[in-house]
Amino acid sequence: MKKLTSFFVVALCLLPLGARAGLSVAADLVSAESLFFDTAHLRMDVCLDLTEEFGLRLPITVTAERIKGGPYWVEGGIFLDYHPLGWPLFLSLSLAQVGVLDDRRAGDEPRVLFLNEMAVGWAFAIPPGFVLTPMVIIRDPNRVFEGEYAEMGDIFTHYPMVRCSLLFGWTFPVGRTKAGGE
């Protein structure tokens, strides 16, 4: 828990680093598919635009079986978003991604796993201050963590390696504003 707390403290310290466009908070609308499967996937993202071409993304994902006492997985990470030429199209790569797996059915203690993902998406800005971001998320694109992801696939009944996401949320201006024609 101390590592997760320190992760968020560092993330909050990065906020004043000259963010131009803004900070956005969004929820994954594709999480509604959890109504049709035995596994629920819930995702929230906080995105910070650093420049026109680069930003940071802090996703929090909870995956759980919809049975009492079933296993659950909580993960977070810090991702670098790259917008080529400042376009809304972006490539998101995990810089650090960690999660806690608790499978009480197996009698195991909660374990910490390190993973990686990448995503390709398009950020739509909808006035007044909304954001809509469709993404395709690819888990373990370079196949370094095959064992960890195979274990996740064994524990959860619905844990796809390629997942679509539709983030919807709000964006807030962050940083200095120009006052009086400066």
Image: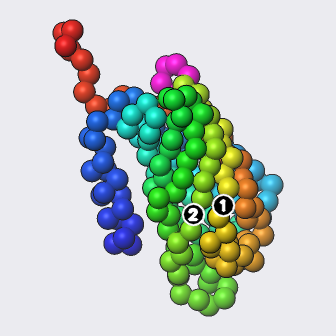
In the image, is residue 168 above or below residue 2? above
Q: Is residue 147 magenta?
A: no
Give the extent of the magenta segment.
126-130
| Amino acid type, mark 1 | Pro
The residue indicated by pointer 2 is: 116
Q: In this view, which residue lies farthest toward the right?
A: 36
Q: Which of the two residues, 27 or 10, is positioned nearer the viewer here?
A: 10
Question: Residue 141 — which label?
Answer: 1
Q: Which of the two residues, 13 or 139, is positioned nearer the viewer here?
A: 139
In the rendered view, does 52 fall on the left or right side of 90?
left
Q: Position of residue 126 (x, y in %)?
A: 56, 22
Q: Which of the two residues, 45 or 64, is positioned nearer the viewer here?
A: 45
Q: Which of the two residues, 153 or 40, is positioned nearer the viewer here?
A: 153
Decide if residue 71 is in sight here: no
Give the number of callouts.
2
In the image, is residue 80 above or below residue 114? above
State if disc 2 and disc 1 touch (CB < 8 Å): yes
In the image, is residue 5 above or below residue 68? above
| Amino acid type, mark 2 | Asn
Ranked by sequence position, the earlier of labels 1 and 2 is 2
Q: Residue at x 26, y 22 (%)?
A: 177
